[in-house]
Amino acid sequence: MKMKWTLLALIFAVATALTGCENPLAVFDPKGPQAATLSDTIILTIWIMLAICVVVTVAFIYMLVKYRASKQSKDYEPPHIEGSAVVETIWTAIPIIIVAFLSVVTVVSLKDVEATPKGYENKEPLVIYASSSNWKWHFSYPEENIETVNYVYVPTDRPLEFKLYSYGPISSFWIPQLGGQKYAMADMVTTLHLLADEPGEMWGRNSNFSGKGSAHQLFDVQAVSPAEFEEWVEEAKAKSEPLTEEKFDELLKTEHVGRQTFTGTHLEFSPAPEGSHNMDDMENKEDMEDMEDMNHDMDHK
């Protein structure tokens, strides 16, 4: 009886955590298609694991009750029972099927979240260079020619390409309500595709422990309509001071700063690393190298 109530309490707690709407976990409150894909995958995995736990627990209790010790005489010998090929096949096949199913779901989900959101392939993305330093985030908008520190504005219903790299240790760029995390590293650029499909305020952070200040390496995310985004860009250009190389060097040396806005970007005097970890960029680079090798061979012929 005690085991029964314990199991019911566990199921109730998990169901409450998954369906609670007053203060939902950020990963279960998606504001974009990539985050929705990840949330659905996590919830599906949780329900599968919960179902496995319930089945195993019920089978365990059944075995304890059915084959519990009885008041047989000391010379009692149980009958010899041969193993069942059917049962052995079933308990071997079920884990294989579960692992194969979860593997397919994971691969499909990763493919979706790593690519430009479906339906937006032909729409020009907004490119934002997000670089980390101890213990802050710098957001460079090369098209808009502005740069922010510790906060970022993004328009809704437009694909986003975050180009990630670091001026210090490896950091992990993560906006839970928009998508999964990806590492920002020195001497390499990684690309993270995101999209916000509704306006609102969100939080992002460095989810990687990279030193004493990493727990406070947070940034504010404001998703606004395209019109509001353009208004913010114009206001930022009109009211902000230019970002100089001296000012940027000072920012890199300062550990903790608040929200700041500048005209111009540090990409003008401190460009992003040339190395890329984005599959599309790597394939394009390999194509260029192959073409150069072909031209080189033709010249020698």
Image (spheres, rainbow, N blue to C red):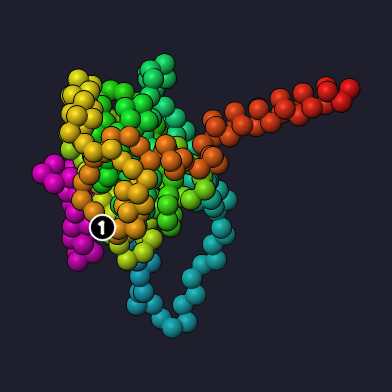
Q: Is residue 199 visible?
A: no
Q: Which residue is mark 1?
A: 256
Q: Nearer the viewer, residue 271 or 221?
A: 271
Where 121 sits versus 202, above or below? above
Disc 1 residue type? Answer: His
**Extreme residue toward the top, this view:** 122
Q: Residue at x 36, y 64 (%)?
A: 211
**215 in the magenta segment:** no
93 to the left or right of 197:
right
Q: Residue at x 65, y 27 (%)?
A: 287
Where is residue 60, by image quadrant?
Answer: bottom left
In percent of width and height, residue 174 lies at 33, 45
Where is residue 135, by image quadrant?
Answer: bottom left
Q: Nearer the viewer, residue 100 or 296?
A: 296
Q: In which quadrant of the rendered image does the N terminus lie?
A: bottom left
49 to the left or right of 258:
right
Mark 1 secondary-structure assignment:
loop
Start and end of the magenta stretch?
1-27
**Extreme residue toward the left, this view:** 22
Q: Is residue 91 visible?
A: yes
In percent of width and height, residue 148 lies at 27, 40
Q: Nearer the viewer, residue 225 or 236?
A: 236
Q: Residue at x 54, y 40 (%)?
A: 274
Looking at the magenta stretch, what is its main secondary structure?
Answer: helix
Q: Residues within 10 Å of mark 1 (few under 14, many from 20)?
A: some
Q: Nearer the viewer, residue 71 or 278?
A: 278
